[in-house]
Image (spheres, rainbow, N blue to C red):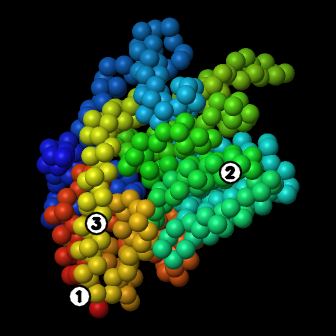
Amino acid sequence: MLDIQKIRADFPILNQKVNGKPLVYFDNGATSQKPQVVIDAISKYYQEINANIHRGVHTLSQLATDAYEVARGKVQHHINAKHAHEVLFTSGTTFGINLVANGFAAILKPGDEVIVSHLEHHSNIVPWQMLCEKTGATLKVIPMSENGELIMTEYDKLLSGKTKIVAVNHISNALGIINPVKYMIDKAHEVGAAILIDGAQSVPHLKPDVQALDCDFYAFSGHKMCGPTGTGVLYGKEEWLHKLPPYQGGGEMIKEVTFEKTTYADLPHKFEAGTPHIAGGIVLGTAIDYLNSVGFENIQKQELELLAYATERLSEIEGLRIYGNSKNKTSVISFNIEGIHPYDIGTIIDKLGIAVRTGHHCAQPIMNFFGIPGTIRASFSFYNTKEEIDALVEAVKKAKMMLS
Ligand code: 7TS
């Protein structure tokens, strides 16, 4: 059992008032809060070892380089990648997906097909649309059902020899639905297609095993898993990272440069042009250590309890509809109240100290599917409590009264 009060003491931001009320932070799907160890590790880096990496012979540069590579190793073990050089540090999920989509421009031909799903964040739609525009390939979309699940029989029908890559999220940000990614990966491979998993919303809740999944790419952001903003990881299978061209040209990603010809550095440096977010990469390692010290089993247990409690309590409110009723869900509740715009509820409950996200959550096709402008999304983390859910329910009831 987690000692929630002890865990909450690790997160200084949680212990404050917003608009005169105790902060209730339920916007974890947008970004998580940071524990003190992560905040301290950022200062420590700049106080003690700040230097550019992979460049100098001097001691600080070596210390910074070593710390950065230790962090890469931590990520490798965390996601069970076969090689450390399959772990690319990026600025976030968006960067990782764009890197892969850009690389596939060198591979796709007119008539080829790219598959995404109806449940994607715009980050996992737009780069593939841009790729299709560039190459003449066609974008296909796996449809979803009323309860927010992807329809696997339709996925099976879309797959063919023309499919070159499938891109799907592990967990939907707008509804919290957990997709059957292992099935989807195996099916993509049956037709010889590559598959990218957008893990932005899964890594705060579970420990992905990229070898067991057998995915070709797995992209995620550090800031949703207690790490700093501007950090992220793209895992790519070695064979694919060799096949794809570099994304950006610049320092650090080369072996040799002449005006006639440039040769590229080995993995992972081929994809890491320029000075990276050194402190961020190192501290992402600290965040991963922190999450593992809490334990993913404990995290899941606490979050599923919060999900069940919030679903039950919110359902007390007349006219409240929850979107995405699948059993395969993480701790996200997306809802609306009949006749009231989600933005209005969000604004009123903010005055009561409660932070939720309202709007389309960068997933407009899902909102279009339900015929709504957006939802109110409460996304819970392991450091949230049932008392906070009670505060949300009371605040929503109050807002409903004021607005109806
Ligand atoms: N993919 C998914 C599934 C996401 O939820 C997000 C961000 C991204 C990609 C992009 O991640 P980034 O770190 O590169 O921006 N999702 C959200 C959200 O749900 N609310 O704010 C950001």
| Vertical order, 180 against 325 (above or below) | above
Would you name the residue on which mark 3 appears?
308
Identity of the residue drawn at 36% across and 36% down: 288
Would you name the residue on which mark 1 appears?
401
Disc 2 on helix, strand or loop? helix
Task: Mark 2 or mark 1: name the one nearer the start of the chain.
Answer: 2
Would the CB of label 2 be found within 8 Å of ligand 1?
no
Callout 3, which amino acid?
A: Ala
Disc 3 on helix, strand or loop? helix
Q: Are marks 2 and 1 in contact (CB under 8 Å)?
A: no
Would you name the residue on which mark 2 appears?
188
Give the class, few, some or many, for how many residues have Cα within 10 Å of label 1's Cα (few <14, many ≥20).
few
Q: CA distance from mark 3 to mark 1?
A: 25 Å
Identity of the residue drawn at 38% across and 52% down: 31
Q: Nearer the viewer, mark 2 or mark 1?
A: 2
Location of residue 366 in the rendering, given as x and y in whole percent from the top left corner: 54, 71
Give the class, few, some or many, for how many residues have Cα within 10 Å of label 2's Cα (few <14, many ≥20).
many
Callout 1, which amino acid?
A: Met
Task: Mark 3 or mark 1: name the one nearer the start of the chain.
Answer: 3
Location of residue 108 in the rendering, given as x and y in whole percent from the top left corner: 80, 48
Q: CA distance from mark 2 to mark 3?
A: 33 Å
Q: CA distance from mark 2 to mark 1?
A: 49 Å
| Vertical order, 234 against 196 (above or below) | above
Task: Mark 2 or mark 3: name the one nearer the start of the chain.
Answer: 2
Query: 180 and 44: which one is in front?
Result: 180
Identity of the residue drawn at 33% across and 87% down: 319
The reply to whether residue 133 is in sight is: no
The reply to whether residue 157 is in sight is: yes
Question: Which label is found at residue 221?
Answer: none
Residue 132 picture quarter? bottom right
